[in-house]
Image (cartoon, rainbow, N blue to C red):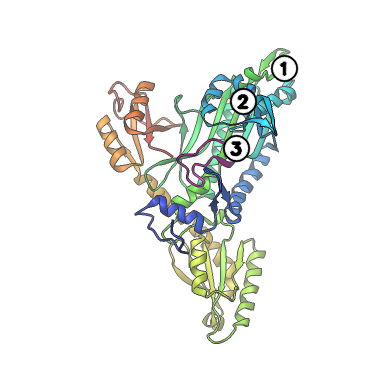
Amino acid sequence: MSKEIGITVSKKDDLSEWYTQVVTKSGLADYASVKGFMVLMPYGYSIWEKIKEFLDKRLKTMGHSNAYFPLLIPESFLRREAEHFSGFTPEVFWVTSAGNDKLAERLAVRPTSETVIYDSYAKWIRSWRDLPLLINVWNSVLRAEIKMTKPFMRTSEFLWQEGHTVHADKEDTDAEVMRILELYRQLIEEQLAIPALAGYKTDREKFVGALYTTTLESMMPDGKALQMGTSHNLGQNFSKAFEIKYLGKDEQTHYAWNASWGVSWRLIGAVVMLHGDDRGLVIPPRIAPVQVVIVPIPYKNAGGADIVSRCRSLAEKLQEAGINVFLDDRAHYTPGWKFNDWEQKGVPVRIEIGPRDISRQQITMVRRDTSERSVAPETDAINETKMLLDAIQSSLFEKASRSLRQAIHDARTYQELKQAIETEGGFVRGCWCGETACEDQIKDETGATIRVVPIQDEQVFSGCVCCGKAAKKAVYFARAY
């Protein structure tokens, strides 16, 4: 990777190298000394905080509470739910000793928290009055990703939230799954400005140990799908494994139902990849740590103290109006250097104030997404800035939505499916008979999987795209991260 300050490759020509340069040079993240791990730098963490704040506030409004559970999980816990254990074993980091003493039982470093959380739930739940139990956890998990790593997208440790809820019956669990899926959709589409397809996973692709999995899938510029968030109905599998029972209103003992759901810092990677350009990041205003940067343009051969003072006054007014603003009054950098620096960091709006602006009592505003320049009366700076931020947010989503629509192709035959996967990429909509054998064949021969089975059935427009027999569902295939 180049050590030059700016982005040295084109997104179109070398997406992988472009992505790595944007992530590191913009100050989002850095590589750690341990392979497969990364350092989340302050600028990147501040974006994660924006995501966290949005979700945390709404989850609490919906009745969820935050808790924390241990990092280390006894191997015997994982083995209680056999399907779950077999699905995660290849990815688990194990602790086998404490100091110089070998442990009697291996401890898994949390790959996900179902087992350790449900061990506690079995102690806490006794009656129908204890339900529903709605708990969310903000933590990190570890899954062995050593060979094919990419910052945010695929690392051995990642930050996420995982919700784990307990319910009296399937109906209430189903409702929870869909409530969370809708919350994730709001986050992804309305905050991150990334359109997503919502639907179910097939039994082959669902979360191990789940009754069913719902998902939100987005499309990246290289034609690969990215799973943005999932919400699962775990049925009674874990309740039976961990003896989570409650005394019902009918005075009978029942096994409880569980739901789990989560999103990770992978969302930040999606923002980088989808919205960024050859100058660096483009951050949607609603998750931007800095929404507006103000850059003074001093008089030539003069210090420009009056201009800096005017900029400081404007920054205070914007801050009071709830806009995240940064005044870049660093005297040891030129305005041009600052422009490039903040463009690379993806700040949505740049405000310039120079001698001409002062004399005309105006501000110059520059959009990061389009580079469009405009002027506005200084007295109307707050309203103009808010309108511009809203316009950028909408524009980014509309642009991404157009790209998603263009990335969906229909296939009626297996040859059409293979050709679309190889030459077009993106989502390929095809009809499926419901047989796992066809699903397996498609994955083995094309590398594509069924990413989404739409929640609302779409019209079946052909026979099964693989075997030609009568189809049951129209589904979306894609290669994926």
| Residue 272 appears in the rendering | yes
Nearer the observer, 335 or 316 = 335
| Contact check, label 2 and label 1, Cβ < 8 Å | no
For this view, does 457 lie left or right of residue 64?
left
Q: CA distance from mark 2 to mark 1?
A: 19 Å
| Boundaries of the magenta span | 142-161
Q: Hey, which quadrant is residue 81 in on the image?
A: top right
Residue indicated by mark 2: 258
Residue 249: mark in rendering? 1
Q: Position of residue 408 (x, y in %)?
A: 35, 41
Q: Is-magenta flag for residue 160? A: yes
Q: Residue at x 54, y 78 (%)?
A: 297
Q: Nearer the viewer, residue 240 or 430?
A: 240
Pick whichever of labels 2 and 1 is earlier in the sequence.
1
53 in the magenta segment: no
Taking the image as shown, residue 443 lies to the left or right of residue 188, namely left
At label 3, which amino acid type do we have? Answer: Val
Q: Is residue 337 above or below residue 230?
A: below
Task: Name the residue type under label 1.
Answer: Lys
